[in-house]
C-alpha cells in the first residue's frame, strides 16, 4: 500500500547525497566561445588605449599589442592642445567646446518638440493624428542625402549656416520624427481617463502636460536623453555639412586630424584624439548601461 | 510497477532551503494532488520529479528505476504546463508530433497515437490550427493530448486549470478525472485549489513551508485533519477553531464558559486535565434545531447573515471571535442580525488539537 | 469658448512638428527630386529640359563610380547580415548560460556608444600593414598572414564589413536577447521533456517564434547599410580608387567635391528609391505580422 513517513527523524541527516555539481562540458564550450568573442570586441579599445600612452619610438618598433614601456600623457596633451586639424592647430579642445554647444540646444529643442508632439498625438483627439503618424514613420527612414541640399539653403537663408546653431537646428529636425514616435508610444499607454479627469478639473493642454504627463515621463526621458546625447555627440555628417569651418564638432576635428596627413603620422596622438572623442558617450554607457540598452531597443523597435 | 517515490529530498536554492528531507510515495494508478499555498514547495517538488531542476540531496524513484540523475526525456513522463507551453509556430498536429519526433517511433505508430489522442480529447477538427487560433479550453485539451500521446508512465500537471474561467474549470476537472479513470495512469497534479484536489485526487499531500503536513485520501484530510494548518486550509468556509481547556470527566470548557462533551471523540492520546486544546468545528456540522445529545450547545448573537441562494452563512459572535455556521435558507429565513440563537454540535464530528503543537490528539 | 480652445491648443502645439515635416521632409524631398531633373551645376537652375528630363539618371547609370557604389551596397548588406547571425548566436549563448550575462552584454554592446569615426580610426590602425595586426603576426613568424586589406581595392570592403560587424553585432545581440527572454520558460521545459535536440528546438520553435525580431533587425540593417558614410570616411575615404564607394558617399562626393548639384540630386533620389524598395516590403510584412498576431489574440 501507499506509505508516507514524516521525516522528522531523518531531518538534518543527509541521505543519498549527490556529488557536487560540476560545470557541464557544454557550458565550458559556451563560455570559451563567449570569452573569445569578448576578446575580439575588446581588441580595438585595448589598442586605442595602449597606443595612446606609448611613445612614437615604441610604436615604430611594431608590437601593436604590447603595453607601453613608458606611460606618457604627452600624446593626450598634444591631441587636446596642439594637434592640427585642417588648417588650424589648436587640438581637439575647440571641437569639444563646439560639440557641447551643439549638444545642449539640440537636446532641449528636440526633446521639447517631440515630447509635446507625442503627447498631443497620443492623448488629445487630433483627427489627422493617424495619417500624420504614418508620415512621421516614413520620415524617420528617409536618407539624409535627399534633404541635404534644401536644408543647406534653408540654413543659409536663416543666416545660421556655418554656426553651431545650424548644426543644432538640423539635429532637432532630423530627430523629431523618431523621438515623436517614441514619446507617442510611451504616452498612449497613459489611461485616457486621467486626461478626461484632468479636463473636468479645468486643466488646460499645457497644464496637463506640465503637471501630469511630464512627471510621469521620467523613464522615457532618461532613455531618450541617452539616445540623443550619444547620437548627437557621435554625429559626423551633419557637423561636417553644416558646421562650416568655425563650428565643427569634435568628430569632424578628429576625422580631419587623422585623414589629413602632413609629414609623419603620430599614431599615439591619433589614438589619444579618438579616445578623447569617445570618452563622453562611453562614460554614459558604462554608468547608465541599462537605460542605454532600453534606449536602443526603443529607438530600434519603435522607430 | 511505476510507484513514484521521493526519498529524503532536500532542495536548496542558494541559502534558501525549499524542501528539507521530504518523503512521499504513491502507487501505480494513484492520482496524487500536491496541494498548498503558493511558495509551499509543491511546484519545486514537481519540477524535481520532471527533472527540470536537480535535487540537492535525496533520491527519486519511478518504479524500480532511480531517475534522480536521468535527463527529463529519459524519465518516461509527460507534463501539462500551467501556460500549456504549446509550440506557437506549429499546428496542433505539429505539437503532438514534435513531442514524439525524438522518440524514434515508426511513423505509423506516431500517426496512430495522434489519431487516438485526437479522438480521446475530441480535438480532431482542430488538428490543422495553430495554438493562437484556439480558445483556452481547446489549448488545454491539446496540452493534455500532447502529454497523452507519449504513453508515459507518469503524467504531471502543473496548475493546469488556473488560466481557465470558472465554468471551463469545472468541465475540465471532470474531463481529467474521466481520463484518469479510463486510462488509469499515475498522476502527480499540483494545485492551490482545494476543490480540484478534493474532486480529482485519490491521494492528497498537503504541503506548507516545504513540508508535508498531511498525506491521505480526500476524506482523510477533510474528516480527520492531522493538524491545525490542514484544519484551517481545507474546507470553505474554513473550520471554526476555538480554544478550550480540558476538565475532568472527558469534558472541556470553551472560552465563553460553555462545556464541551468530548465523549464521542476517539483520542490518540487522552489529554490530562488542565491541558490547552483547540477545538475544530466545521460550519456545516452545526445544527439550529436542538440536538438530542450534543457535544456542546452555544447561545450566540447573530452578527451577520450571508445568503448564497443554496446556503446561508451565519456569522455569530463568540467573545471577540466569530463562529461561522452553515444552515439552509429556510431555517434562517426569519433570522436577522442581532438575534440570539442556540446552535448545537454533534459529538462524533469533533476535531481536537493540542494548542501547543497544533497536532491532532 | 473653453471647448474651442481645448480643441485648438493641441493643434497649435503640433505646428512645429507639422512645419518640420512639411518643409524639411516633404518639401525638401520634392525640391531635390525637382533638382535631379535639371542641369544644375554648382548653383541651382530650375529650368527643366523636357525633351530629356532624366538625363542625370542616364549619366548616373553610365558612371562607373555609381555602379561600384551599388555593388558595394549589396556586398556590405550581405556582409553586415553576419552581424545579425553573430548577434543571435551571442544572445542565444548568453541566454542559455546566464553566467556572466551582464559582463558579456556590456562588452558586446560598448562599440555602439562609440562614434563610427573613432571606430574607423581604431580599425585603420589595426589594419596598418607596417605596425598593426599584420606585423604582429609576422613577428610571430606567420609571414603568410596578410592583413593589409585597406590598401587593396579587392579586400578594402571586407575590412569595412569587419569593422561594421564589430560595431553593430552587440546591438543585434541586445535585440535578440530581449526577444529570447520574452519566450515563455515553459516552452523550454516542454522541449526538454520531449527530448528534442537543442538545435531542432532553436530551428523549429525558437527562431520561428522570433521572426518579428528578425524582421526588425533586417529593417534596421538595411537602413544602416544605405546610410553608411562615416565609417567609409574614417577608414578609406572611398579608396583605394573608388573601390569602397557607397551611394551615400557617392552622393555627397558629387555635391561637395564635384559641385554637380543635379547629378547629386539624382543619386539622392535613387537612394530614396532604394530605401523604399527595400523598406516598404519589410515594413508591410512586419505590420501584417503584427496584425495577424493581434487579430488572432483578439
Image (cartoon, coloured by chain):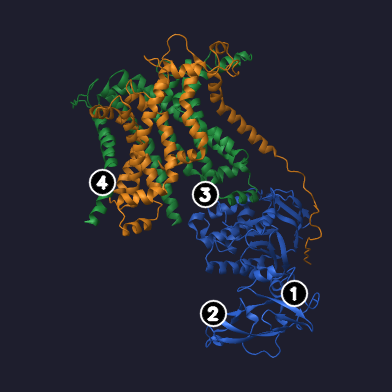
Judge whether B316 appears above or below C132 on screen: below
Q: Nearer the viewer, residue A252 or B219?
A: A252
The CA span between labels 2 and 3 is: 54 Å
Circle 4 packing at 10 Å, graded few (<14), some (14-19), many (20+), is few
- Residue C287: image location, x then y, percent: 40, 46
Circle 2 packing at 10 Å, graded few (<14), some (14-19), many (20+), is some
**Chain identifier of the blue chain:** B
Foreground tag (4 vs 1) = 1
Q: Mark 4 lies on which chain?
A: C
Q: Which chain carries label 1?
A: B
Which residue lies under the disc numbered 3? B89
Residue in the picture at 62% in, 64% down: B192
Which residue lies under the disc numbered 4? C12
Residue C244: mark: none
**Chain identifier of the green chain:** C
Residue in the picture at 47% in, 29% down: A280
Judge whether B4 appears above or below B90 on screen: below
Residue lying furthest top: A263
**Chain identifier of the orange chain:** A
Judge whether C1 appears above or below B264 on screen: above
Residue B304: mark: 2
- Residue C293: image location, x then y, percent: 45, 51
Of labels 2 and 1, earlier in sequence is 1
Q: Is residue A140 visible?
A: no
Amino acid at each position: 500500500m501507499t506509505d508516507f513517513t514524516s521525516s522528522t527523524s531523518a531531518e538534518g541527516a543527509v541521505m543519498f547525497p549527490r556529488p557536487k555539481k560540476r560545470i557541464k562540458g557544454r557550458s565550458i564550450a559556451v563560455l570559451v566561445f563567449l570569452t573569445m568573442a569578448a576578446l575580439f570586441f575588446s581588441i580595438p579599445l585595448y589598442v586605442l588605449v595602449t597606443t595612446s600612452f606609448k611613445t612614437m619610438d615604441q610604436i615604430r618598433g611594431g608590437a601593436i599589442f604590447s603595453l607601453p614601456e613608458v606611460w606618457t600623457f604627452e600624446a593626450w596633451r598634444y591631441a587636446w592642445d596642439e594637434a592640427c586639424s585642417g588648417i588650424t592647430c589648436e587640438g581637439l579642445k575647440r571641437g569639444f567646446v563646439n560639440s557641447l554647444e551643439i549638444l545642449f540646444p539640440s537636446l532641449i529643442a528636440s526633446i521639447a518638440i517631440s515630447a509635446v508632439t507625442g503627447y498631443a498625438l497620443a492623448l488629445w483627439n487630433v483627427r489627422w493624428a493617424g495619417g500624420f503618424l504614418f508620415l512621421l514613420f516614413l520620415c524617420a527612414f528617409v536618407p539624409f542625402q535627399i534633404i541635404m541640399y534644401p536644408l543647406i539653403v534653408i540654413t543659409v537663408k536663416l543666416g545660421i549656416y556655418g554656426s553651431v546653431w545650424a548644426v543644432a537646428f538640423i539635429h532637432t529636425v532630423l530627430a523629431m520624427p523618431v523621438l515623436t514616435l517614441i514619446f507617442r508610444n510611451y504616452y498612449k499607454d497613459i489611461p485616457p481617463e486621467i486626461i478626461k479627469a484632468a479636463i473636468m478639473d479645468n486643466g488646460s493642454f499645457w497644464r496637463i502636460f506640465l503637471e501630469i504627463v511630464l512627471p510621469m515621463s521620467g523613464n522615457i526621458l532618461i532613455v531618450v536623453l541617452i539616445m540623443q546625447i550619444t547620437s548627437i555627440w557621435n554625429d559626423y555628417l551633419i557637423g561636417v555639412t553644416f558646421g562650416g569651418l568655425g563650428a565643427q564638432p569634435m568628430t569632424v576635428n578628429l576625422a580631419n586630424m587623422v585623414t589629413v596627413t602632413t609629414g609623419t603620422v603620430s599614431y599615439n596622438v591619433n589614438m589619444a584624439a579618438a579616445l578623447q572623442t569617445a570618452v563622453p558617450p562611453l562614460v554614459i554607457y558604462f554608468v547608465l548601461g541599462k537605460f542605454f540598452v532600453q534606449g536602443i531597443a526603443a529607438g530600434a523597435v519603435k522607430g | 510497477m511505476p510507484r513514484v517515490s521521493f526519498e529524503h529530498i532536500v532542495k536548496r536554492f542558494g541559502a534558501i532551503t525549499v524542501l528539507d528531507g521530504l518523503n512521499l510515495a504513491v502507487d501505480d494508478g494513484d492520482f496524487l494532488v500536491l496541494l498548498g499555498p503558493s511558495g509551499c514547495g509543491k511546484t519545486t517538488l514537481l519540477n524535481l520529479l520532471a527533472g527540470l531542476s536537480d535535487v540537492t540531496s535525496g533520491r527519486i524513484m519511478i518504479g524500480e528505476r532511480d531517475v534522480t540523475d536521468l535527463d527529463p526525456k529519459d524519465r518516461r513522463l509527460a507534463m501539462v504546463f500551467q501556460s500549456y507551453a504549446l509550440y506557437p509556430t506549429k499546428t496542433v498536429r505539429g505539437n503532438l508530433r514534435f513531442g514524439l519526433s525524438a522518440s524514434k517511433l515508426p511513423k505509423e505508430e506516431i500517426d496512430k497515437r495522434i489519431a487516438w489522442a485526437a479522438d480521446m480529447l475530441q480535438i480532431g477538427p482542430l488538428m490543422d490550427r495553430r495554438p493562437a487560433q484556439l480558445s483556452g479550453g481547446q489549448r488545454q485539451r491539446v496540452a493534455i493530448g500532447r502529454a497523452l500521446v507519449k504513453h508515459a508512465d507518469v503524467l504531471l500537471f502543473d496548475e493546469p486549470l488556473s488560466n481557465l474561467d470558472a465554468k471551463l474549470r469545472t468541465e475540465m476537472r471532470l474531463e481529467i478525472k474521466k481520463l484518469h479513470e479510463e486510462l488509469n495512469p499515475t498522476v502527480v497534479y499540483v494545485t492551490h485549489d482545494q476543490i480540484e484536489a478534493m474532486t480529482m485526487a485519490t491521494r492528497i499531500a498537503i504541503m506548507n513551508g516545504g513540508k508535508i503536513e498531511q498525506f491521505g485520501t480526500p476524506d482523510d484530510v477533510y474528516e480527520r485533519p492531522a493538524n491545525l494548518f490542514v484544519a484551517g486550509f481545507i474546507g470553505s468556509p474554513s473550520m471554526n477553531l476555538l480554544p478550550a481547556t480540558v476538565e475532568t470527566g472527558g469534558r472541556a470548557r470553551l472560552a465563553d464558559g460553555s462545556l464541551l462533551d468530548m465523549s464521542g471523540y476517539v483520542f490518540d492520546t487522552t489529554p490530562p486535565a488542565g491541558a490547552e486544546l483547540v477545538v475544530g468545528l466545521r460550519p456545516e456540522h452545526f445544527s439550529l434545531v436542538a440536538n438530542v445529545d450534543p457535544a456542546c450547545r452555544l447561545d450566540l448573537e447573530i452578527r451577520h447573515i450571508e445568503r448564497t441562494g443554496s446556503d446561508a452563512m451565519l456569522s455569530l459572535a463568540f467573545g471577540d471571535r466569530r463562529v461561522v455556521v452553515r444552515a439552509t435558507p429556510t431555517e434562517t429565513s426569519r433570522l436577522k442580525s442581532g438575534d440570539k440563537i442556540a446552535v448545537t454540535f454533534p459529538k462524533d464530528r469533533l476535531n481536537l488539537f493540542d494548542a501547543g503543537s497544533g497536532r491532532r490528539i | 469658448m473653453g471647448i474651442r480652445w481645448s480643441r485648438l491648443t493641441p493643434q497649435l502645439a503640433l505646428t512645429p512638428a507639422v512645419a518640420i515635416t512639411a518643409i524639411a521632409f516633404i518639401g525638401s524631398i520634392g525640391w531635390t527630386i525637382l533638382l535631379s531633373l535639371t542641369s544644375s551645376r554648382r548653383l541651382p537652375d530650375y529650368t527643366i529640359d523636357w525633351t530629356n528630363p532624366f538625363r542625370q539618371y542616364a549619366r548616373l547609370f553610365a558612371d562607373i563610380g555609381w555602379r561600384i557604389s551599388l555593388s558595394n551596397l549589396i556586398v556590405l548588406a550581405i556582409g553586415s547580415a553576419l552581424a545579425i547571425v553573430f548577434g543571435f548566436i551571442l544572445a542565444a549563448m548568453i541566454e542559455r548560460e546566464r553566467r556572466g550575462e551582464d559582463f558579456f552584454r556590456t562588452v558586446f554592446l560598448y562599440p555602439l556608444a562609440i562614434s563610427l569615426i573613432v571606430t574607423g580610426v581604431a580599425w585603420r590602425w589595426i589594419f596598418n600593414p607596417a605596425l598593426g595586426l599584420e606585423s604582429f603576426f609576422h613577428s610571430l613568424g606567420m609571414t603568410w598572414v596578410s592583413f593589409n586589406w585597406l590598401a587593396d581595392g579587392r579586400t578594402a570592403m571586407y575590412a569595412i564589413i569587419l569593422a561594421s560587424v564589430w560595431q553593430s553585432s552587440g546591438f543585434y545581440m541586445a535585440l535578440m536577447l530581449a526577444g529570447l527572454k520574452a519566450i515563455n520558460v515553459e516552452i523550454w521545459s516542454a522541449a526538454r521533456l520531449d527530448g528534442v535536440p537543442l538545435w531542432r528546438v532553436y530551428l523549429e520553435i525558437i527562431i520561428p517564434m522570433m521572426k518579428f525580431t528578425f524582421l526588425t533587425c533586417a529593417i534596421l540593417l538595411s537602413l544602416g547599410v544605405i546610410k553608411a558614410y562615416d565609417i567609409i570616411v574614417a577608414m578609406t575615404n572611398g579608396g583605394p580608387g573608388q573601390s569602397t564607394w557607397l551611394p551615400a558617399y557617392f552622393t555627397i562626393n558629387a555635391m561637395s567635391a564635384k559641385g554637380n548639384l543635379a547629378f547629386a540630386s539624382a543619386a539622392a533620389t535613387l537612394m530614396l528609391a532604394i530605401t523604399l524598395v527595400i523598406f516598404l516590403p519589410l515594413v508591410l510584412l512586419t505590420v501584417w505580422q503584427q496584425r495577424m498576431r493581434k487579430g488572432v489574440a483578439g
